[in-house]
Amino acid sequence: MTEEIKIDDELTIGGDEFTIIAGPCAVESEKQMEAIGEFLSDLGVKIIRGGAFKPRTSPKSFQGLGFEGLKILKKLKKHYGFKVISEIMDPRDIEHAYEYIDIYQIGSRNMQNYSLLKEIGKTDKPVLLKRGMSATIDEWIKASEYIRMEGNNRIILCERGIRTFENYTRNTLDLMSVPIMKSETKYPVLIDPSHGTGIRELVLPASKAALAIGADGLIIEIHPQPEKALSDGDQSLDFTGFKNLLDEVNSMIKSLRIDL
Ligand code: PEP
Ligand code: MN
């Protein structure tokens, strides 16, 4: 059984739980986040995602709102009681971000940024470690050891797809990494079907497959108007799409539990 990670003694990731985290790729504005916060809170989603520091391929693309973005997330946290997950790219931001974030996210591009891993390992907050887009399973396991060896074993793994010769999808979602990582590490493993596919229509089937193969949850990108999103609009679900996903996944959880 996967180890449980408790967040403030209020929430558990791993164990018997199936955790659904949702939010936009990037925090863009207060207005956008208020709409998303109200929507997710009504649906009972307890952990909200939103990038404030964005690792964009082009330096000309929207880079995120930085600490202004984290402040917006904190407002939502206060108002709705969400737990917040957000990516940190620079070790110098870890300390300052501590009061805003409940789970530090290490992005795919930084899975092998060993100074960042070591600094995050010195904190006492859970860390979501995404798989590097070109990382083998062995490299991913060793990256998690960099965090653990500094004292932090509250690690959540996240498969978000890897680069292969197949380019129909943005990445190739390696679902086999779920049972492998669960037996090799005992850390909870989440699936990110948004980056894993890059295609909105594939997010639901990938989510169902994640549940079927034993993942501990999902992290999903949503946006009130995906066509206007400043990043990753093509893979973001709108509110109707996300509500439908939640319904489908919840009914699948029910039927799996009855069948057991
Ligand atoms: C993200 O979660 O928005 C993100 C940048 O993901 P990844 O690091 O997996 O590309
Ligand atoms: Mn994204």
Image (cartoon, helix red, strand yellow):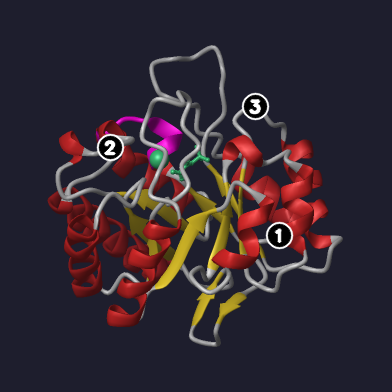
Give the residue displayed 13% in from the left and 52% down from the top: 240
Residue 102 is situated, as x and y percent measured from the top left of the image, at 52, 71
Q: Earlier in the sequence, mark 3 or mark 2?
A: 3
The magenta segment is 194-200
Front one among 203 and 64: 64
User: Quick check: marks 3 and 2 in contact, CB under 8 Å?
Assistant: no
Does 158 sit left or right of 233 as displayed? right
Which residue corresponds to mark 3?
A: 134
Disc 1 marks which residue? 120
Question: Label 2: which residue?
Answer: 230
- By secondary structure, the bulk of the magenta-drawn segment is best described as helix
Q: Determine which of the numbered discs, if any, sits on residue 237 in the image.
A: none
Q: Position of residue 192 (x, y in %)?
A: 45, 45
Q: In the image, is residue 72 above or below residue 131?
A: below
Seen at 41% across and 69% down, the residue is 257
Say whether residue 60 is left or right of residue 6: left
